[in-house]
Amino acid sequence: MASEVSSLEDQAQKFAQSLTATVHAVDPDCEPFTAKYVEGAPRLAVRQSPSKGIPLKVDGVPFLDLKVIFECCMDSKGDYLAVEKSRIEVTPKAGSGPTFRYEYDRNYTKAPPAHMHVHAHRDAFTYLMATAGNSSKRSKRRVESGKVPSLQDIHFPLGGHRFRPCLEDILEILIEEFGVDMQPGTLKALRDGRANWRRTQARSVARDDPQSAVDVLRSLGYDVVWNRSGEEPPVRWDRLEQY
């Protein structure tokens, strides 16, 4: 158990350092990320300290705050760091609340584990939600509540456990769509961070679906054989099927 805790702390600190490197490529003055234990829970929160958010500017003027938190634990086998929960929230300086936010909860069952909320007012969406059917539990609760629905109530799915966006994706969309200021080398840092994230996720996908990984490697010319006792690991259909 002691080695597992040490491994969790070590990997969480490295994750915090990689996040700091990413956000410093956009704003070198923002607060670094640190990893600290969540009170009463066997997991570490990786967040800025103090949690002021990542200040993003347009033409040198504060424009958006990007608040980011990851809660991390060990994976089911106790080998690798896993994100148990995450929240990435974009809030305009001129507003009173977030414009949109990305959330992930690996244990969530009432909605897609990776999803996005859009905080906005749009008549067409409101009409659709107010007049929607009740074929699902969520839509039925919404219809029966009698409340005026809001666009932020919809959980837009974002690729499930393995294919969800990374912090680098969100920083780049803010640069591309809102013209957030960059530093020299910002886009290169975001591309490097994204590549590292996707390679980590590729390893996780291979553990979820080892047979497909074996098939692809064999098609590329590799010799892949099972060399352990017992049965080969099964496909984790629950991970692949969850939206």
Image (tube, rainbow, N blue to C red):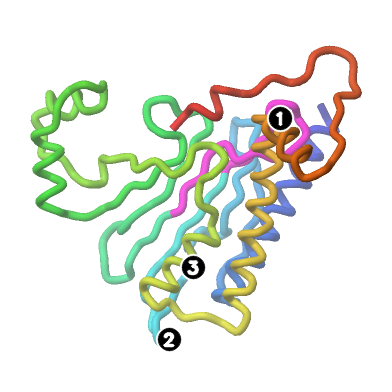
Residue 177 at x, y percent in the picture: 37, 71
Residue at (57, 53) in percent of width and height? 47
Quadrant containing the C terminus is top left
Element marked by disc 1:
helix
Is the residue marked by circle 1 packed among few (<14), some (14-19), or many (20+) residues within 10 Å? some
Name the amino acid type tagged 1: Pro
Residue 119 at x, y percent in the picture: 26, 53
Give the mark, 2 or 3, whose residue is nearer the N terminus.
2
Q: CA distance from mark 3 to mark 1?
A: 32 Å
What label does residue 172 carry, if any? 3
Name the amino acid type tagged 3: Glu
Residue at (12, 23) in percent of width and height? 144
Q: Which residue is mark 1?
A: 210
Whether the magenta-drawn stretch holds residue 85 is answered as: yes
Whether the magenta-drawn stretch holds residue 186 is answered as: no
In the image, residue 90 above or below residue 106: below
What label does residue 60 carry, if any? 2
Is the residue marked by circle 2 packed among few (<14), some (14-19), or many (20+) residues within 10 Å? few
Quadrant containing the N terminus is top right
Residue at (57, 74) in percent of width and height? 187
Numbered range of the magenta stretch: 71-88
Q: Nearer the viewer, residue 233 or 8?
A: 233
Give the mark, 3 or 1, whose residue is nearer the N terminus.
3
Q: Nearer the viewer, residue 218 or 54?
A: 218
Element marked by disc 3:
helix
Residue 222 at x, y percent in the picture: 84, 41
Q: CA distance from mark 1 to mark 2?
A: 48 Å
